[in-house]
Image (cartoon, rainbow, N blue to C red):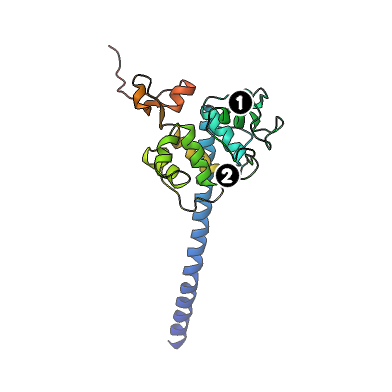
């Protein structure tokens, strides 16, 4: 009987040791599954943006640079892939020459007043920080004026982006470099945002939010809701 008691105590100890080990294995498997699902979501999202003409194939896979993000913003405004290699644009920055892959996009955005750099340099090869990306996105969609009224760079642009639903939420750690996966998520959300453009019917009003998105204005792609009924 004593042997049986000792054996039961040994089995209980062994069982207690196996519980945390089993939990660790489950956590590892769950983490790997989440990472795989996240990766699949990123791939699906990027493929969707590519099909819509809103993604560039030569982007970094880890950290998006300032020049690369400029390419994405130019793509949102209708600059096609074949135009991304054009050298016909005016050279705006000393560090973005005609041989740079972002030359056309950076020059295109500078011509439209979306970017200004520091007047001489744009630093196209530096990873773009989250708040820098938000500022460029806000300007691309035409919301520069309200952003300045809200306090300017960077807080005014972050508040304006959230106020007008250009971003899902204001992220913490806004000085961190933007990853390609988060960048894709950001653009997917922004492509349904309404543009702010000049009020042509009432010039005294200045700019106002228009009932048109990036996809509708620059890519002739619209979304429609309704009920599909069978004929007859």
Front-lying residue, 162 or 13: 162
Please tell me whether residue 123 is drawn above or below residue 109 in the rendered image.
below
Please tell me whether residue 158 is drawn above or below residue 211 in the rendered image.
below
In the picture as drawn, the residue positioned furthest to the top comes out as 232
Query: Circle 2 sits in a helix, a strand or a loop, which is it?
Result: loop
Calculate the distance from the C-alpha at mark 2 to the C-alpha at mark 1: 21 Å
Residue located 43% across and 40% down the image: 148
Image coordinates of residue 185 in percent, x first then y, are 48, 40
Front-lying residue, 223 or 104: 104
Q: Residues within 10 Å of mark 2 (few under 14, many from 20)?
A: many
Locate the N terminus by quadrant: bottom left
Residue located 31% across and 21% down the image: 228
Residue 100's disc number: none
Give the mark count: 2
Taking 97 as reference, is 37 left or right?
left
Can residue 146 be seen here? The reply is yes
Q: Which residue is mark 1?
A: 81
In the picture as drawn, the residue positioned furthest to the left comes out as 232
Residue located 57% across and 27% down the image: 111
Q: Quadrant of residue 216?
A: top left
Compare marks 2 and 1 and give the one earlier in the sequence. Answer: 1
In the picture as drawn, the residue positioned furthest to the bottom comes out as 2
Locate the C terminus by quadrant: top left
Residue 128's disc number: 2
């Amino acid at each position: 009987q004593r042997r049986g008691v000792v054996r039961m105590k040994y089995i209980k100890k062994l069982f207690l040791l196996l519980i945390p080990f089993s939990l660790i294995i489950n956590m590892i498997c769950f983490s790997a599954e989440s990472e795989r699902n996240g990766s699949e979501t990123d791939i699906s999202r990027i493929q969707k943006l590519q099909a819509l003409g809103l993604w560039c194939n030569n982007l970094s896979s880890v950290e998006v640079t300032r020049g690369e993000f400029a390419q994405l913003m130019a793509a949102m405004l209708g600059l096609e892939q074949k135009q991304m290699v054009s050298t016909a644009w005016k050279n705006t920055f000393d560090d973005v020459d005609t041989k740079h892959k972002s030359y056309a996009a950076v020059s295109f955005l500078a011509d439209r007043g979306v970017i200004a750099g520091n007047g001489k340099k744009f630093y196209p090869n530096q990873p773009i920080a989250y708040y820098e990306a938000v500022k460029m996105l806000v300007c691309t969609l035409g919301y520069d004026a309200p952003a300045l009224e809200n306090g300017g760079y960077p807080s005014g642009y972050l508040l304006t982006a959230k106020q007008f639903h250009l971003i899902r939420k204001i992220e913490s750690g806004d000085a961190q470099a933007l990853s390609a996966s988060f960048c894709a998520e950001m653009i997917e959300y922004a492509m349904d945002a309404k543009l702010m453009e000049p009020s042509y019917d009432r010039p005294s009003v200045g700019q106002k939010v228009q009932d048109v998105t990036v996809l509708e204005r620059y890519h002739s792609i619209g979304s429609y809701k309704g009920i599909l009924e069978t004929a007859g």
